[in-house]
Image (cartoon, rainbow, N blue to C red):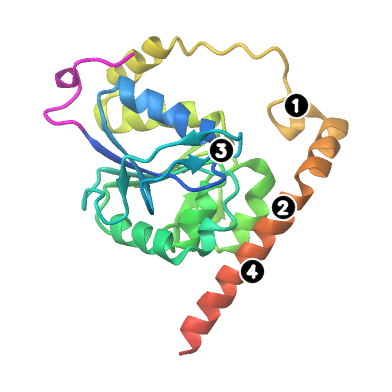
Amino acid sequence: MSFDKSIFAERPLVVAMLLFDGHTALDFIGPHTAFTCAGMEIHLVAGALRPVLTDSGFTITPTTTFDDCPARPDILFVPGGGVDEVMLDEKAIAFLVDRGATASYITSVCNGSLVLAAAGLLDGYRSATHWATRDHLARLGVEVSTERVCVDRNRLSGGGVTAGIDFGLTLIAHVLGEESAKLSQLAMEYDPKPPFDAGSPEGAGPAVVALFDRFASRFDEKFGDAVSRVLEKRSATMAK
């Protein structure tokens, strides 16, 4: 559901949402739905106009390319997921650096923060990320927040996956006012009552966390390798 854009602002806010193979669909669909309900103009950006594979196995088609994306988006957004390749994708990073220089708000959900950090867009800022990738974000020199939604000046970030909805509503309130955010929340009927208290390591307990670690170990290794390569590139650049 979306509303008449005139309800919210004199002009629709322009959102550039990066897509890449292996991204977590809910990381961006949650905020996307909230932004749509708030009448924003959303651009799904990728290197080419071909279907982009999510980590759930289905595809999403971008609406624009790096070159054709609006030059001055109000909001630049990066989802998380399998970020190890996009962190080292020179064209994607160059796009983020370019639009990050003009965007009013630079944002992420889950470990999309690692991609922003790889682009140098979190230098001197705090950021949230998925709880399992906090150590990787810290290695990139970012002050890590354990908040579900972290606001540090014009950097807004959400924790893991489902935090994207809370992030989206927080950002709407930040730029359009609380009433607009509440209207979006009502449109989505976002009234969560989870069946279990297992959405954090503390709530899930050691046994469930251990199961997660077994499942996620290969991804953790990939993220660690990508962070190391980003740091190596930085060192090489500084040495020149």
Check whether the beta carbons of the residues at disc 2 and disc 3 lie within 8 A of each other: no
Q: CA distance from mark 2 to mark 4?
A: 12 Å
Label 2 packing within 10 angstroms: few (<14), some (14-19), many (20+): some
Mark with earlier residue (1, 3): 3
Magenta region: 1-12
Mark 2 sits on what residue?
220
CB of mark 4 within 8 Å of CB of mark 1? Answer: no
Q: Is residue 238 above or below residue 213?
A: below
Q: Tag 1: residue type?
A: Gly
In this view, 220 is above or below 151:
below
Mark 3 → mark 4, Cα distance in angstroms: 22 Å
Q: Secondary structure at mark 2?
A: helix
Q: Nearer the viewer, mark 1 or mark 2?
A: 2
Helix or strand or loop: what does disc 4 sit on?
Answer: helix
Residue at 51% x, 57% y: name it: 86
Q: Within 10 angstroms of label 1, few (less than 14), some, or many (20 or more) residues?
A: few
Question: Which quarter of the rendered picture does the C terminus lie within?
Answer: bottom left
Q: CA distance from mark 2 to mark 3?
A: 15 Å
Q: Amino acid at mark 3?
A: Thr
User: Who comes first in sequence, dot 3 or dot 4?
Assistant: 3
Pointer 1 residue: 203
- Amino acid type of disc 4? Ser
Residue named by callout 4:
228
From the viewer's perspective, is the residue at label 2 or at label 3 nearer? 3
